[in-house]
Image (cartoon, helix red, strand yellow):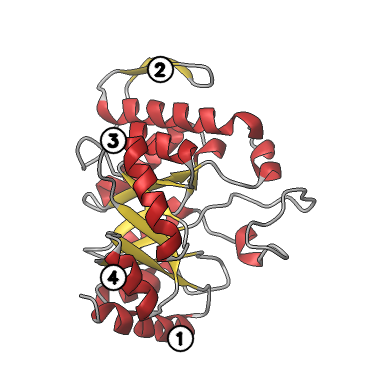
Amino acid sequence: MKFGVSTFVTDQGIRPAPLGRALDERRFDSLFLAEHTHIPVERRTPYPGGGDLPEIYYRTLDPFVTLASIAAVTRHLLLGTGIALVAQRDPIITAKEVSSLDLVSDGRAVFGVGAGWNREEMENHGTDPSTRGRLVNERLRAIRELWTKEKAEFHGEFVNFDPVFQWPKPVQRPHPPIYVGGGGDAAFRRIAELGDAWLANSESPEQLRPQIERLREVAGREVPVTVYAVPEDPDVVEGYQRIGVERVLFYLPTMPEAETIARLDAMAQVANRFR
């Protein structure tokens, strides 16, 4: 089993470079960063975690700027978005950001994607929440065309462009892996067509097992599973190991550097029991 970390990098916590070096030194295999461009002050959409929305949601750094700075001080760490809000992103710009990150990191980019939950946030980007699933799928198809074709073009319901040149192409072939977040058949169909792995929420191993079985039915193949925001509990980790999860991402709270390093040491101790 592989071990990574999921977190929100903000202006109030550890800086990107020290975080990246600490993860590399402790042999974590990956880092997945959350994305929110902003949070509207007036919201109707309830926070999925319940209660008030934590401040970290509107203080996140741009994930691609953050991951690029971490790429410069690491050698082995996979650099992922967890998740990039594709429903709020221009696909041409996003294709270039991901492929540029893949180039500067020598092929370590992971494109974790999702449809998002905050309706007011996506509306500010001109996105209709009721069609965001179709929009995400179409933008992912367009992004893959830009990554893999010398002269890329796309004509769809939401995305439309005539043949274009765009470089750099990704280092990874045919493109950086696409990890799809979310659950249920809509996400599983997205994985079947467009994804390379499932970025699952931190449900218990018992709850996750039937979902993995359903994912295999929908996708028609084995799909690697990475579980997001896992507590550093050896019993929980062992449960994920039993059901064949490829990677767990321990959840790292946003804290100052000294506290972060201490928490990473504790996480590494748990990971070392399973390596």
Is residue 221 visible in the rendered image? The answer is yes
Q: Is mark 4 on a helix, strand or loop?
A: loop
Give the quarter of the image for residue 28.
Answer: bottom left
Q: Is mark 3 on a helix, strand or loop?
A: loop
Give the quarter of the image for residue 147.
Answer: top left
Type of amino acid under label 4: Phe
Q: How crowded is mark 2: few (under 14 residues within 10 Å), some or many (20 or more)?
A: some
The image's mark for residue 258 is 1
Give the quarter of the image for residue 125.
Answer: top right
The image's mark for residue 216 is none
Specify the quadrant that holds the N terminus: bottom left
Q: Residue at x 32, y 22 (%)?
A: 165
Q: Is mark 2 on a helix, strand or loop?
A: strand
Residue on which the image places disc 3: 220
Viewer-side residue, 123 vs 66: 123
**Considering only order in the chain, which callout, 3 or 1, is on the residue closer to the N terminus?**
3
Type of amino acid under label 3: Gly
Type of amino acid under label 2: Phe
Measured along the vertical axis of the image, is residue 205 above or below residue 109? Answer: below
Residue 143 spot, x, y in % from top left: 38, 31
Viewer-side residue, 6 vs 74: 6
Marks 3 and 4, how far apart at CA? 31 Å
Viewer-side residue, 155 vs 72: 155
**Considering only order in the chain, which callout, 4 or 1, is on the residue closer to the N terminus?**
4
